[in-house]
Image (cartoon, rainbow, N blue to C red):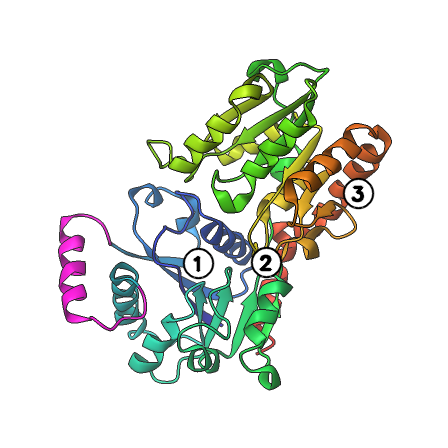
Amino acid sequence: MKIAILTSGIMPVPAVQGGAVETLIDFYLSYNDHHRLHDITVFSVWNPDVEQHQALRSTVNHYVYIKTNGCLAILKKRVFQLTHVQEYYHHSMAYYLHEAIKQIHIKNYDLIIIENRPGYVLTLNKQLINPTCILHLHNDFLNIETQNAPTIFQGYGRIICISNFITAKVNQIAPKHAKAITVHNAIDTKLFYGAKSAKREAIGFSEDDFVLVYSGRLNEEKGILPLVKAVKQLAKSKIKLLIIGDSNYGMDKHPTPFVDRLHQEVEFIKDQIVFTGFIDYSQIPSYLKMADIAVIPSMWDEPFGLTVVEAMAAGLPLITTRSGGIPEICEGVATIVDRDNIVENLANAILELYENPEKREAMAIISLKHSKFFDKERYAEEFYRALETM
C-alpha cells in the first residue's frame, strides 16, 4: 500500500528530540524498512538533526519536512493564524497540517495514518476527496466528551489505540459501530536486556542499601510526592530512593513550583534520596538496574505507562497504581495499589517487599519474562496487521 503519515506536528521524525509518539513511529518505520511491506511517506516538522540520520537512506520510507521554526516559518504561521481563526488545533499544528495537505494533494495515497491528532480528520475531509484515514491514538483525546466526537469518529475507517483503556473510551462514542482496536505500545527491550547496572557508589548509595527507583517526569500527576512521603513514613535508613527525571525532559532551565515543593518535602531525609535530573534515555536501563524495586505511583489515568514496561524489562519487582491502562500491562506481575490512601498503600507495599527477598526474586523473574510481550518487533507486526483489517 501507499501510505502517508501525519505526525502530531510538534516534534520531528526520526525522533532526534525524543518523544514517545515519535519513537513509536520510528519503530514501525524501521520494521517496514526491514520487511519492505509498504511505500510510506512521513510528513514531519523539520529539525536540523534529522538531515544526517540513517533512517533517511531507506528506499521504502520517505520523509517530507515542513519548517515550522525560523523567521520565515514564524511569519507564515502568523499569517496563517490571522486567516484561519476557526482551526481545531493550535495554529502551529494547524499550519503544519495545512502545509502537509498541500503536498498530499499531489499524490494518491491508499491510507493516511494520523498520529494522535483526532481532529486532523475534520480538515482532511474538507480538503481531500474521501481520504481513507486511520487514527493511531496514544492519549485520551477522543471520547464522548471530545468536541465534534461523533463526526471525528465517523471520519476514520479504523482507530488503533495503545491500550484497552483508551479503546473502551473511544468505542463509547458509537457502541454499535465499534471501530477502535488495541495494539499495545512497546519499547526496545534489547536496550534493557543487555544493559549493565551503574555503580551505586557513583551516586552515593552502598551495596547494603535497599534502593527504590522512580523514573519519569517530576509533576504532581506522576505521584512522586506521595512516594517521597511514603519513604519518610517508613523511616528506615537503609531504604533509599533514586529519582530519575525532571519536570520536562531536560528542557526546563529552572525548577517548577512543584519541584521546589518536592525538594522541601525531602529536606529531613535528603541523605536517603538522590535526584539525578534529566538522564539521556540510553542510560536509563543502567540506572534502573542498580535498584532493588521500581515504584511507578501514577495518580492520573495513564493511557499506557511505558515506564512500567521499562521497569519490567530491567528485571525489577514493581509497585504501581490502579491507574488507566497500567493494570492491563502488569496485572498478576506487579503489586498494584489503589490511589485512595496512596501514601499508606505505597508504604505498606514497599515494606512487604523490603522484608521478603524471596518474593522480590520471584517478581523479578516474572517481570523480565512478561516484558518480552512489549517488544518493538511484536508491536510493529501487530500494527501493520491492524492496517489490513479495515
Residue at the disc numbered 2: 380
- How many numbered circles does the render carry? 3
Q: Which amino acid does label 3 sit on?
A: Ile
Q: Which residue is drawn at 48% across and 78% down?
A: 153
Residue at the disc numbered 3: 366
Residue at the disc numbered 1: 61
Q: From what the image shows, is residue 188 above or below residue 243?
A: below
The reply to whether discs 1 and 2 touch (Cβ–Cβ < 8 Å) is: no
Q: Can residue 189 be seen in this view?
A: no
Of the image marks 2 and 3, the number of the one nearer the N terminus = 3
- Position of residue 189 in the picture relative to residue 244 (left or right): right
Measured from the top left, where is residue 279 in percent x and y? 48, 31
Of the image marks 1 and 2, the number of the one nearer the N terminus = 1
Q: How crowded is mark 3: few (under 14 residues within 10 Å), some or many (20 or more)?
A: some
Q: For numbered disc 2, what is the local secondary structure? A: helix
**Cα gap from disc 1 to disc 3, whole angstroms:** 37 Å
Report the magenta residues as a range: 68-89
**Cα gap from disc 2 to disc 3, whole angstroms:** 24 Å
Q: For numbered disc 3, what is the local secondary structure? A: helix
Q: Which amino acid does label 1 sit on?
A: Asn
- Position of residue 208 in the picture relative to residue 92 (left or right): right
Of the image marks 1 and 3, the number of the one nearer the N terminus = 1
Q: In this orientation, which residue lies closer to the viewer: 232 or 129?
A: 232
Q: Which amino acid does label 2 sit on?
A: Ala
Mark 1 vs mark 2: in front: 2
Measured from the top left, where is residue 386 in percent x and y? 60, 70
Q: For numbered disc 1, what is the local secondary structure? A: strand
The reply to whether discs 1 and 3 touch (Cβ–Cβ < 8 Å) is: no
Measured from the top left, where is residue 216 in percent x and y? 53, 39
Q: Magenta includes 33?
A: no
Q: Residue at x 67, y 25 (%)?
A: 211
